[in-house]
Protein backbone atom coordinates (compact mmCIF):
# COMPACT_ATOMS: atom_id res chain seq x y z
CA UNK A 1 0.00 0.00 0.00
CA UNK A 2 2.95 2.35 0.54
CA UNK A 3 4.29 4.56 -2.17
CA UNK A 4 1.14 5.92 -3.78
CA UNK A 5 -0.97 9.01 -3.27
CA UNK A 6 -3.95 8.30 -1.03
CA UNK A 7 -6.84 10.68 -0.83
CA UNK A 8 -10.31 10.98 0.69
CA UNK A 9 -12.96 13.68 1.15
CA UNK A 10 -15.27 13.97 4.12
CA UNK A 11 -18.14 16.29 5.04
CA UNK A 12 -18.97 17.19 8.61
CA UNK A 13 -21.55 19.57 10.08
CA UNK A 14 -21.17 21.97 12.99
CA UNK A 15 -23.13 21.50 16.18
CA UNK A 16 -24.50 23.86 18.80
CA UNK A 17 -24.06 22.84 22.42
CA UNK A 18 -27.06 22.84 24.75
CA UNK A 19 -24.76 21.74 27.58
CA UNK A 20 -21.41 23.39 26.97
CA UNK A 21 -18.00 21.80 27.08
CA UNK A 22 -15.70 24.36 28.67
CA UNK A 23 -12.54 23.07 30.34
CA UNK A 24 -10.23 20.08 30.08
CA UNK A 25 -9.43 17.90 33.06
CA UNK A 26 -6.59 16.25 31.15
CA UNK A 27 -5.19 18.38 28.39
CA UNK A 28 -2.82 15.80 26.91
CA UNK A 29 -5.64 13.25 26.60
CA UNK A 30 -8.30 15.86 25.76
CA UNK A 31 -10.61 14.70 28.55
CA UNK A 32 -13.16 17.35 29.56
CA UNK A 33 -14.37 18.13 33.06
CA UNK A 34 -18.00 17.56 32.11
CA UNK A 35 -20.10 15.70 29.59
CA UNK A 36 -21.81 17.93 27.01
CA UNK A 37 -24.91 17.73 24.82
CA UNK A 38 -25.41 19.26 21.39
CA UNK A 39 -27.59 19.38 18.32
CA UNK A 40 -25.92 18.66 14.99
CA UNK A 41 -27.06 21.23 12.42
CA UNK A 42 -28.23 20.60 8.88
CA UNK A 43 -27.18 22.52 5.74
CA UNK A 44 -23.88 23.82 7.14
CA UNK A 45 -20.73 21.83 6.59
CA UNK A 46 -16.97 21.67 6.33
CA UNK A 47 -15.77 19.66 3.35
CA UNK A 48 -12.22 18.45 3.73
CA UNK A 49 -9.97 16.58 1.32
CA UNK A 50 -6.75 15.02 2.59
CA UNK A 51 -4.18 13.74 0.09
CA UNK A 52 -1.20 11.85 1.53
CA UNK A 53 1.70 11.90 -0.89
CA UNK A 54 4.91 9.92 -0.33
CA UNK A 55 6.80 12.61 -2.28
CA UNK A 56 5.65 15.35 0.07
CA UNK A 57 7.73 16.25 3.12
CA UNK A 58 5.83 19.20 4.61
CA UNK A 59 2.09 19.33 5.11
CA UNK A 60 0.31 21.99 3.09
CA UNK A 61 -2.95 23.21 4.57
CA UNK A 62 -5.47 25.38 2.70
CA UNK A 63 -8.45 26.63 4.71
CA UNK A 64 -11.21 28.36 2.76
CA UNK A 65 -8.90 29.03 -0.18
CA UNK A 66 -6.02 30.48 1.87
CA UNK A 67 -2.79 28.75 2.81
CA UNK A 68 -2.83 28.31 6.58
CA UNK A 69 0.20 29.33 8.65
CA UNK A 70 1.04 29.57 12.35
CA UNK A 71 -1.40 28.24 14.93
CA UNK A 72 -4.20 27.04 12.61
CA UNK A 73 -1.69 25.11 10.46
CA UNK A 74 0.05 23.68 13.54
CA UNK A 75 -3.25 22.36 14.91
CA UNK A 76 -3.91 20.49 11.65
CA UNK A 77 -0.34 19.14 11.44
CA UNK A 78 -0.48 17.89 15.06
CA UNK A 79 -3.74 16.14 14.29
CA UNK A 80 -2.31 14.56 11.12
CA UNK A 81 0.72 13.37 13.14
CA UNK A 82 -1.66 11.49 15.42
CA UNK A 83 -3.36 9.83 12.42
CA UNK A 84 -0.02 9.07 10.71
CA UNK A 85 1.32 7.44 13.89
CA UNK A 86 -1.78 5.26 14.04
CA UNK A 87 -1.44 4.20 10.40
CA UNK A 88 2.33 3.91 10.66
CA UNK A 89 3.09 6.26 7.73
CA UNK A 90 5.21 9.39 7.50
CA UNK A 91 3.99 10.99 4.26
CA UNK A 92 3.23 14.64 4.09
CA UNK A 93 -0.30 15.67 3.23
CA UNK A 94 -2.18 18.31 1.35
CA UNK A 95 -5.33 19.37 3.19
CA UNK A 96 -8.05 21.40 1.50
CA UNK A 97 -10.95 22.46 3.67
CA UNK A 98 -13.91 24.68 2.83
CA UNK A 99 -16.73 25.81 5.08
CA UNK A 100 -20.04 26.95 3.63
CA UNK A 101 -20.47 29.36 6.60
CA UNK A 102 -18.35 32.00 8.43
CA UNK A 103 -15.24 30.63 10.16
CA UNK A 104 -14.12 31.25 13.77
CA UNK A 105 -17.16 33.28 14.66
CA UNK A 106 -19.24 31.13 16.97
CA UNK A 107 -20.60 28.79 14.33
CA UNK A 108 -18.30 26.06 15.54
CA UNK A 109 -16.10 25.68 12.50
CA UNK A 110 -13.57 23.85 14.67
CA UNK A 111 -16.16 21.13 15.35
CA UNK A 112 -17.05 20.56 11.71
CA UNK A 113 -13.46 21.16 10.56
CA UNK A 114 -11.82 18.61 12.82
CA UNK A 115 -14.59 16.05 12.41
CA UNK A 116 -14.15 16.33 8.63
CA UNK A 117 -10.35 16.19 8.96
CA UNK A 118 -10.55 13.09 11.16
CA UNK A 119 -12.86 11.38 8.68
CA UNK A 120 -10.85 12.33 5.59
CA UNK A 121 -7.40 11.57 7.01
CA UNK A 122 -8.31 8.18 8.50
CA UNK A 123 -10.24 7.14 5.40
CA UNK A 124 -7.38 8.16 3.10
CA UNK A 125 -4.97 5.99 5.09
CA UNK A 126 -7.33 3.03 5.10
CA UNK A 127 -7.98 3.08 8.85
CA UNK A 128 -11.47 1.73 9.15
CA UNK A 129 -12.65 3.43 12.30
CA UNK A 130 -16.12 3.01 13.73
CA UNK A 131 -18.06 6.23 14.33
CA UNK A 132 -17.25 5.90 18.04
CA UNK A 133 -13.53 5.56 17.34
CA UNK A 134 -13.69 8.50 14.96
CA UNK A 135 -15.37 10.56 17.68
CA UNK A 136 -12.70 9.51 20.20
CA UNK A 137 -10.03 10.65 17.75
CA UNK A 138 -11.72 13.87 16.59
CA UNK A 139 -11.78 15.26 20.14
CA UNK A 140 -8.00 15.70 19.95
CA UNK A 141 -8.49 18.30 17.21
CA UNK A 142 -11.28 20.10 19.00
CA UNK A 143 -13.46 18.75 21.78
CA UNK A 144 -16.73 19.69 20.14
CA UNK A 145 -15.64 17.84 16.95
CA UNK A 146 -16.26 14.56 18.78
CA UNK A 147 -19.98 15.37 18.62
CA UNK A 148 -20.13 16.34 14.91
CA UNK A 149 -19.42 12.73 13.93
CA UNK A 150 -23.07 11.97 14.81
CA UNK A 151 -26.35 13.48 13.69
CA UNK A 152 -29.30 14.68 15.76
CA UNK A 153 -28.97 15.10 19.53
CA UNK A 154 -25.56 14.00 20.72
CA UNK A 155 -23.84 13.56 24.05
CA UNK A 156 -20.07 13.67 24.47
CA UNK A 157 -19.38 11.65 27.60
CA UNK A 158 -16.43 12.76 29.66
CA UNK A 159 -16.01 9.18 30.87
CA UNK A 160 -14.32 7.89 34.00
CA UNK A 161 -11.22 6.05 32.81
CA UNK A 162 -7.89 7.83 33.25
CA UNK A 163 -6.73 6.82 29.74
CA UNK A 164 -9.73 8.51 28.09
CA UNK A 165 -10.88 5.34 26.33
CA UNK A 166 -14.48 5.91 27.49
CA UNK A 167 -14.41 9.56 26.39
CA UNK A 168 -16.42 9.76 23.16
CA UNK A 169 -19.71 11.02 21.79
CA UNK A 170 -22.81 8.95 21.18
CA UNK A 171 -26.15 9.79 19.61
CA UNK A 172 -29.02 10.33 22.05
CA UNK A 173 -31.79 10.87 19.49
CA UNK A 174 -31.66 10.95 15.71
CA UNK A 175 -32.20 14.04 13.51
CA UNK A 176 -35.91 13.19 13.07
CA UNK A 177 -36.66 12.83 16.77
CA UNK A 178 -38.31 16.26 17.13
CA UNK A 179 -39.42 17.64 13.76
CA UNK A 180 -41.02 20.77 15.28
CA UNK A 181 -37.80 21.99 16.88
CA UNK A 182 -35.79 24.54 14.88
CA UNK A 183 -32.72 26.67 15.43
CA UNK A 184 -32.87 30.23 14.11
CA UNK A 185 -29.30 31.46 13.85
CA UNK A 186 -28.84 35.21 13.94
CA UNK A 187 -25.56 36.29 12.41
CA UNK A 188 -24.49 39.61 13.87
CA UNK A 189 -22.49 42.26 12.03
CA UNK A 190 -18.93 42.92 13.14
CA UNK A 191 -18.59 39.64 15.04
CA UNK A 192 -14.92 39.67 16.04
CA UNK A 193 -12.75 36.78 14.92
CA UNK A 194 -11.68 34.91 18.05
CA UNK A 195 -8.62 36.47 19.67
CA UNK A 196 -7.84 33.45 21.87
CA UNK A 197 -8.35 29.84 20.77
CA UNK A 198 -11.13 28.29 22.81
CA UNK A 199 -8.83 25.64 24.23
CA UNK A 200 -6.64 28.34 25.79
CA UNK A 201 -9.64 30.41 26.84
CA UNK A 202 -11.39 27.55 28.62
CA UNK A 203 -8.25 26.61 30.56
CA UNK A 204 -8.03 30.23 31.70
CA UNK A 205 -11.60 29.86 32.99
CA UNK A 206 -10.70 26.66 34.84
CA UNK A 207 -7.72 28.39 36.43
CA UNK A 208 -9.26 31.75 37.31
CA UNK A 209 -13.07 31.84 37.40
CA UNK A 210 -14.28 31.71 41.02
CA UNK A 211 -17.59 30.27 39.78
CA UNK A 212 -16.26 27.33 37.78
CA UNK A 213 -16.54 24.78 40.61
CA UNK A 214 -20.17 25.73 41.22
CA UNK A 215 -20.93 25.35 37.52
CA UNK A 216 -19.41 21.84 37.52
CA UNK A 217 -21.44 20.89 40.57
CA UNK A 218 -24.68 22.04 38.89
CA UNK A 219 -24.06 20.35 35.57
CA UNK A 220 -25.01 16.70 36.23
CA UNK A 221 -28.51 17.71 37.39
CA UNK A 222 -29.02 20.23 34.60
CA UNK A 223 -27.79 17.75 31.98
CA UNK A 224 -30.17 15.07 33.23
CA UNK A 225 -33.08 17.51 32.98
CA UNK A 226 -32.04 18.61 29.49
CA UNK A 227 -31.77 15.01 28.29
CA UNK A 228 -35.20 14.22 29.73
CA UNK A 229 -36.81 17.32 28.17
CA UNK A 230 -35.35 16.45 24.75
CA UNK A 231 -36.57 12.87 25.14
CA UNK A 232 -40.09 14.07 25.97
CA UNK A 233 -39.99 16.76 23.23
CA UNK A 234 -40.97 19.20 25.95
CA UNK A 235 -40.12 22.75 24.88
CA UNK A 236 -41.62 24.29 28.02
CA UNK A 237 -39.09 22.40 30.13
CA UNK A 238 -36.21 22.51 27.70
CA UNK A 239 -36.12 26.18 26.72
CA UNK A 240 -35.55 27.65 30.21
CA UNK A 241 -32.84 25.03 30.81
CA UNK A 242 -31.04 25.90 27.56
CA UNK A 243 -30.92 29.56 28.63
CA UNK A 244 -29.89 28.73 32.19
CA UNK A 245 -26.99 26.68 30.83
CA UNK A 246 -25.97 29.41 28.39
CA UNK A 247 -26.07 31.99 31.19
CA UNK A 248 -23.89 29.74 33.36
CA UNK A 249 -21.37 29.35 30.53
CA UNK A 250 -21.32 33.12 29.90
CA UNK A 251 -20.93 33.80 33.60
CA UNK A 252 -17.79 31.71 33.97
CA UNK A 253 -16.39 33.35 30.83
CA UNK A 254 -17.06 36.83 32.16
CA UNK A 255 -15.52 36.03 35.54
CA UNK A 256 -12.36 34.62 33.91
CA UNK A 257 -9.28 36.81 34.39
CA UNK A 258 -8.78 38.49 31.98
CA UNK A 259 -12.49 38.46 31.26
CA UNK A 260 -13.76 36.63 28.16
CA UNK A 261 -16.51 38.53 26.41
CA UNK A 262 -17.71 36.97 23.18
CA UNK A 263 -20.85 39.03 22.62
CA UNK A 264 -21.50 42.29 20.81
CA UNK A 265 -24.19 44.84 21.70
CA UNK A 266 -26.38 43.17 19.08
CA UNK A 267 -25.89 39.70 20.60
CA UNK A 268 -26.94 41.08 24.00
CA UNK A 269 -29.98 42.77 22.47
CA UNK A 270 -31.00 39.41 20.94
CA UNK A 271 -30.78 37.66 24.32
CA UNK A 272 -32.77 40.41 25.96
CA UNK A 273 -35.48 40.37 23.28
CA UNK A 274 -35.90 36.58 23.66
CA UNK A 275 -36.47 37.13 27.40
CA UNK A 276 -39.05 39.81 26.58
CA UNK A 277 -40.87 37.59 24.05
CA UNK A 278 -41.13 34.83 26.66
CA UNK A 279 -42.27 37.22 29.41
CA UNK A 280 -44.96 38.72 27.19
CA UNK A 281 -46.21 35.31 26.07
CA UNK A 282 -46.20 33.98 29.62
CA UNK A 283 -44.50 30.83 28.35
CA UNK A 284 -41.11 29.88 26.96
CA UNK A 285 -41.62 30.53 23.24
CA UNK A 286 -37.91 30.54 22.46
CA UNK A 287 -34.49 29.84 23.98
CA UNK A 288 -31.23 31.59 23.19
CA UNK A 289 -27.79 30.10 23.29
CA UNK A 290 -24.35 30.99 21.98
CA UNK A 291 -20.91 29.47 21.93
CA UNK A 292 -17.58 31.27 22.17
CA UNK A 293 -18.69 33.79 19.55
CA UNK A 294 -21.13 36.61 18.89
CA UNK A 295 -23.78 34.87 16.78
CA UNK A 296 -26.92 33.84 18.62
CA UNK A 297 -28.86 30.60 18.17
CA UNK A 298 -32.54 30.79 19.06
CA UNK A 299 -34.41 27.53 19.46
CA UNK A 300 -38.12 27.66 18.92
CA UNK A 301 -40.95 25.54 17.56
CA UNK A 302 -41.89 25.69 13.91
CA UNK A 303 -45.23 27.36 14.54
CA UNK A 304 -43.53 30.23 16.39
CA UNK A 305 -40.86 30.92 13.76
CA UNK A 306 -42.65 33.85 12.06
CA UNK A 307 -43.29 35.61 15.39
CA UNK A 308 -39.79 35.08 16.71
CA UNK A 309 -38.14 36.08 13.45
CA UNK A 310 -40.26 39.21 13.19
CA UNK A 311 -39.14 40.33 16.64
CA UNK A 312 -35.44 39.51 16.26
CA UNK A 313 -34.39 39.79 12.64
CA UNK A 314 -34.74 43.58 12.48
CA UNK A 315 -32.75 44.42 15.60
CA UNK A 316 -29.91 46.79 14.67
CA UNK A 317 -26.74 44.89 13.82
CA UNK A 318 -28.38 41.63 12.79
CA UNK A 319 -26.89 40.68 9.43
CA UNK A 320 -29.22 37.81 8.59
CA UNK A 321 -31.00 34.87 10.11
CA UNK A 322 -30.96 31.26 8.94
CA UNK A 323 -33.38 28.52 9.81
CA UNK A 324 -31.55 25.32 10.73
CA UNK A 325 -32.77 21.96 11.93
CA UNK A 326 -31.18 18.95 13.51
CA UNK A 327 -29.28 17.18 10.73
CA UNK A 328 -27.16 14.14 9.94
CA UNK A 329 -23.60 13.61 11.13
CA UNK A 330 -20.33 13.46 9.22
CA UNK A 331 -19.96 11.22 6.18
CA UNK A 332 -17.58 10.33 3.41
CA UNK A 333 -17.97 12.12 0.06
CA UNK A 334 -17.56 9.54 -2.69
O1 LIG B 1 -14.34 22.37 20.59
P1 LIG B 1 -13.76 23.68 20.94
O2 LIG B 1 -12.37 23.59 21.44
O3 LIG B 1 -13.89 24.67 19.82
O4 LIG B 1 -14.63 24.30 22.16
C1 LIG B 1 -16.01 24.43 22.08
C2 LIG B 1 -16.53 25.24 23.20
C3 LIG B 1 -17.99 25.68 23.08
O5 LIG B 1 -18.36 25.78 21.74
C4 LIG B 1 -18.14 27.04 23.73
C5 LIG B 1 -18.93 24.72 23.82
C6 LIG B 1 -19.24 23.42 23.13
O6 LIG B 1 -19.48 22.46 23.85
O7 LIG B 1 -19.30 23.36 21.89
Image (cartoon, rainbow, N blue to C red):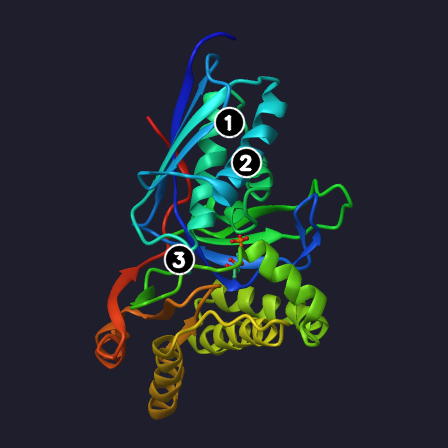
Queried on whether the Cβ of the residue with tag 1 lies below 8 angstroms from ligand 1, the answer reads no
Q: Does residue 260 appear to the left or right of 68 in the view shown?
A: right
Could you tell which of marks 1 and 2 lies nearer the N-terminus? 1
Q: CA distance from mark 1 to mark 2?
A: 8 Å
Residue displayed at 60% across by 56% down: 200
Which residue is tagged 3?
A: 107
Mark 1 vs mark 3: give the one in front: 3
Mark identifier at residue 299: none
Could you tell which of marks 3 and 2 lies nearer the N-terminus? 3
Queried on whether the Cβ of the residue with tag 2 lies below 8 angstroms from ligand 1, the answer reads no
Q: Does residue 116 appear to the left or right of 34 in the view shown?
A: left
Which residue is tagged 1?
A: 122
In the displayed structure, would residue 322 be above or below residue 168? below
Do labels 3 and 2 touch, CB within 8 Å? no
Which residue is tagged 2?
A: 134
Dot 1: within a 10 Å radius of its alpha carbon, few (fewer than 14), some, or many (20 or more) residues?
many
Question: Outermost residue toward the front?
Answer: 70
Queried on whether the Cβ of the residue with tag 3 lies below 8 angstroms from ligand 1, the answer reads no
Mark 3 vs mark 2: give the one in front: 3
Quadrant in which residue 193 is drawn: bottom left
Return the x and y of residue 37 as percentages of the image width and height: 54, 59
Q: CA distance from mark 3 to mark 2?
A: 21 Å
Dot 3: within a 10 Å radius of its alpha carbon, few (fewer than 14), some, or many (20 or more) residues?
many
- Point out the image quarter for the C terminus: top left
Q: CA distance from mark 1 to mark 3?
A: 25 Å
Residue displayed at 42% across by 14% down: 5
Return the x and y of residue 290 as percentages of the image width and height: 44, 67
Residue displayed at 55% across by 42% down: 141
Amino acid sequence: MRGRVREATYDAPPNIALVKYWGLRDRALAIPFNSSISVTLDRLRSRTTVRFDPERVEDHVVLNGETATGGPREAVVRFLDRVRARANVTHGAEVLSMNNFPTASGLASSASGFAALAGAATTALGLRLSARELSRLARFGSGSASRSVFGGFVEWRAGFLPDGSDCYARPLYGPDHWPALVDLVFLVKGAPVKAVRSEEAMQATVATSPNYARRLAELPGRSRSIRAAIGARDARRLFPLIMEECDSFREVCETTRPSLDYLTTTSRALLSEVRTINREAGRPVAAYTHDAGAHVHVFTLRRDVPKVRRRLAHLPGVERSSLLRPGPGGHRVP
